[in-house]
Amino acid sequence: MKRPTLLKQHNELAKLRPEPKGPAFMNCWFLSLNQLLAILEGVSSNDSSQESLFTTRHIVMGSLDFYFEHAQALALKANQGP
């Protein structure tokens, strides 16, 4: 198949895809053990565990990559300033 044919097919299929209604899983989390361990890295008390959990609680960047979004949330928090 030539490139214009593939592009045309892609555009036709994209029209069939429903529009997202909102952020997926905004109000509930499904975490793997590895994701939970990434969140709890460096936690030493109850308060720090809650703070760590809430760091990425409402971050939705649309990348569908938890680890990228978690790292971005930590970077934003570190650069937040006073």
Image (cartoon, rainbow, N blue to C red):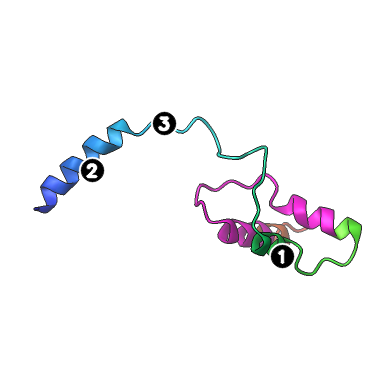
Spatial separation of the CA atoms under disc 2 and disc 1: 38 Å
Task: Examine the structure image and report whether residue 58 is included in the region drawn in magenta.
Answer: yes
Residue 30 visible to an observer of this rendering: yes
Residue 73, percent across and down?
66, 56
Residue 54's place in the image compared with 81, above or below, is above
The residue lying furthest to the left in this view is: 2
Q: Residue at coordinates 89% horizontally, 56% vertically from top-left?
A: 47
Magenta-highlighted stretch: main secondary structure?
helix
Label 3 vs 2, first from the N-terminus: 2
Q: Residue at coordinates 69% horizontally, 65% vertically from top-left?
A: 38
Task: Examine the structure image and report whether residue 74 is included in the region drawn in magenta.
Answer: yes
Mark 2: few, some, or many residues within 10 Å (few <14, many ≥20)?
Answer: few
* Three-letter amino acid code at the position of disc 3: Glu
**At numbered mark 3, what does the secondary structure look like: helix, strand or loop?**
loop
Tell me the magenta residue range. 49-75
Residue 23, percent across and down?
56, 38
Q: Which one is in front in this view, the residue at disc 2 or the one at disc 1?
A: 1
Q: In this figure, which residue is indicated by the disc labeled 1?
A: 37
Q: In this figure, which residue is indicated by the disc labeled 3?
A: 19
Residue 8, percent across and down?
16, 41
Residue 5, percent across and down?
11, 46
Q: How many numbered marks have been drawn onto this rendered protein structure?
A: 3
* Three-letter amino acid code at the position of disc 2: His
Label 1 vs 3, first from the N-terminus: 3
Q: In this figure, which residue is indicated by the disc labeled 2?
A: 10
